[in-house]
Amino acid sequence: MRSIIVGTAGHIDHGKTSLVRRLTGIDTDRLEEEKRRGISIELGFAHLDLGDGVRAGFIDVPGHERFVRTMLAGVSGIDVVLLVIGADEGIKPQTREHFDICRLLGVERGIVVLTKADLVDAEWLELVRMEVEEFVAGSFLEGAPILPVSAKTGEGVEALQAELRKVAHSLRPRNPATAFRLPIDRSFAMKGFGTVVTGTLMAGRVEVEQEVELYPTGRRLRVRGLQVHGKPAAKAVAGQRTAVNLAGIEHSQIERGMVLSEPGWFEPVRVVDARLILLPTAKPLKLRTLVHFHSGTAETVAEMRLLEGTALQPGESGWVRLRLRQGLLLFPGDRCILRQFSPVVTIGGATVCEIAPPRRTSPDRLQTLATATPAAAAQLLVTESAAGLDRAELRRKLGAAPDLPVGLIACGGHVVAASWAQARLSLAEKTLAAFHRANPLQAGMAKGELRGKVLSQGPAHLFDALLSMTTKLTAQQDLVRLSTHRVQLQEDESAAREKMENAFRQGGLATPGLSEVLLQSGVENARARLLLQMLLKERRLVKVSEELVYHIETLDGLKALLAGKKGQSFGVGDFKDWTGVSRKYAIPLLELLDRERITRRVGEQRLIL
């Protein structure tokens, strides 16, 4: 079954609601005030099986100038517009504004419907047709069907249905493989079900029991049930009118303008760069101005700043930066409507090029981004960044998870240019080679120090991922070395190392002072301390305090002694008697045993565990 979304547009009292009612049998005026006043105030929804495998969802919008903001919430995401013009009155102000909005939103297909055809004669109807042809010339409606229809008599209804079927089969289906996005246009409570929201599914798909996120609040919710065009469904796909029954939230906590989408994928944005088209009827725009910003079903106030020139003249286009008062879920390619701050009239439309843009940009850069494929856009965004981009950030900037083009690689949670990664690794190799030459007795360079020289602007996890990409570098705990590097001792250094180790081994529990051992090692103090560090890292020696170092065999012997007394309690005096050491050695040794959970202090006593 092929689904299409059909939206009405046109001046107040030109018969949009009556037309939808005649087509579908559904009265879209739900409010008591709408019925009393005879005008649409809120969005209305209906559906119809057109036959030939086509199902249409209808969005009926208000025609009064006071409700254009409501009209904007309904017309976004439609496939086909019915431009409704009363045959008895012809083109009126809201006909023009609604038509401008459809053009600015990029609506590509439509049908002109001359309603109330039963009220005029054939000659008058022909005059109105000629007026309409001139009005739509050069637009997406040039050459579109112009059908006289009477909701009262049914004249032209079958012809309109036939044209809708024809248009439906000519439309390109939307891509259901992208991240799903449902701008909410209505939220209400249904008895026995709870909270229900409705909207036109702009992209992707959603299924029953799926977890979704409510933007911009960040709340995670569960899809309890779905309806598509008024019928229960297990899933909904892009291009369908969808009602979603949500668990875990009250309907009053959801407002028009919020969006359901993939959980954890995106973030609301407050700054976007966009290409603006200024209507010929608008006033010239200066460097900075406040506007009403409409995207999907959302509305907020934005400060608009020109990115080129000092003014934009009516009918011209240019690059602008928009700072939104409220964070919205926006993707590159989204079409937006801008309305003058006061008086509130439509002045133009914008196409989002980049969300959360860098502080500085240029028209040439934006033009490149606007015309690039997702892969090419990813290439540009990654390569111009100092240390690549986090995968999630790249996905947010593109509005989708792209296939990485040749030249880009995944590096941990980052995406980087392969050439950049190789350059960083080459720098790391050169830096380590120089370090090893200057410090032959050191096992490696501190990882933090190396990262500061190689990747000062990148996160630590990216540096770790880089190191894992090569076999030429080896990371061990907090040190990094060339994989080929081995500590090579000179003859005097080997003798000094052996002498130092023997001194601590022979000293037993009454270990010699560290300073004394270093002094008698046979090499200068700096090299002696490096040899000591080697023995400590190899766990041949264990440092108990600043001045006390023990040989590992001595400590193993002490632990074996205590193992034969497991479960006993003892004091410091007992320990001195068992080991034959003074308090100078006893207290640091006992603290070491406590740390290693060989013993546990209980008051003035200790328990052997």
Image (cartoon, helix red, strand yellow):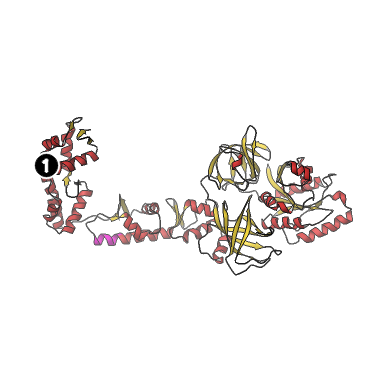
Work out whether 229 lies above or below 455. Answer: above
Percent of width and height locating residue 189: 64, 37
Please name the residue that numbered disc 1 is placed on: 582
Give the residue at the far bottom of this rendering.
310
Residue found at x 80% / y 45%: 158
- In the picture, the quarter occupied by the C terminus is top left
Q: Nearer the viewer, residue 234 or 265?
A: 265
From this view, report whether residue 565 is shown above or below residue 240.
Answer: above
> Magenta segment: does it hold 434?
yes
User: Dividing the picture into quarters, in which one does residue 453 lie?
Assistant: bottom left
Identify residue type, mark 1.
Ser
**Is residue 554 something one can see in this rendering?**
yes
State the extent of the magenta-drawn residues as a range.
432-442
Question: Measured from the top left, where is residue 508 in percent x and y?
Answer: 12, 43
Percent across and percent down for residue 344 are 68, 58
Question: In the visual, does 26 lie left or right of 327?
Answer: right
- Pick the quarter of the image with the N terminus: top right
**Main secondary structure along the magenta-highlighted residues:** helix
